[in-house]
Amino acid sequence: MGNLYKLPLVFEPAEEGGWTITCPILPGFITEADSLEEINENVQDALEALVEGYHEIGQPLPEVLKPLSITTPFVTETLLELAA
C-alpha cells in the first residue's frame, strides 16, 4: 500500500458541467472531474503530478503534505449520490 494523504478539496461547479477541484493548502493543485466516478482518479493523478514536480525541481514537499499513518484513525468526508 502506498502513502495515504488527507487533503481538503474545494469543488467549484464548472459552467460546462462537472467541477474544478483545488486544494487550498497546496498551491498549484488543480484538476477537473465531470462525474463523481472521476473524482478519486483525477485527484490522485493531480497529487502524483504535483509531488513529481516538487521532486523534479529539487524542492521538499510542503510541510502540510505528510502521509497519514495507516495505524491511526482519521476522519474524512465522502460524496455520495442517492437516487431521488
Image: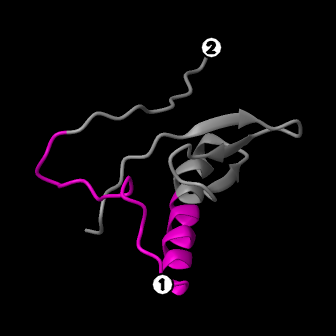
Crowding at mark 1 (Cα within 10 Å: few <14, some 14-19, many 20+): few
For the residue pair 39 and 68, the one nearer the viewer reads as 68
In the image, residue 49 lies in the stretch drawn in magenta: yes
Give the image location of residue 7, x and y in percent: 43, 46
**Left or right, 1 with reference to 40:** left
**The quadrant where residue 5 appears:** bottom left
Image: 42 above or below 15 = below
Q: Which residue is mark 1?
A: 58
Give percent across and percent down for residue 72: 13, 46
Residue visible at 88% across and 36% down in the picture: 15
Q: Furthest-right residue in view?
A: 16
Q: Amino acid at mark 2?
A: Ala
Residue 31 location (% of width, % of height): 67, 55
Q: Is residue 42 left or right of residue 3?
A: right
Q: Position of residue 51 (x, y in %)?
A: 48, 71
Say which residue appears at 60% left-offset and 55% top-offset: 27
The label number, if any, that marks residue 84 in the structure image: 2
User: What number is the disc on residue 47?
Assistant: none
| Residue 14 shown left or right of residue 48 in the figure | right
The residue lying at 66 percent from left, 54 percent from top is 30
Q: Which span of residues is magenta-colored?
A: 44-73
For label 2, the SS is: loop
Choose the circle earlier in sequence order: 1 or 2.
1
Give whichever of 44, 22 is nearer the camera.
22
| Image quadrant in which the C terminus is located | top right
Q: For the residue labelled by badge 1, is the local secondary structure a helix, a strand or a loop?
A: loop
- Rendered image quadrant of residue 1: bottom left
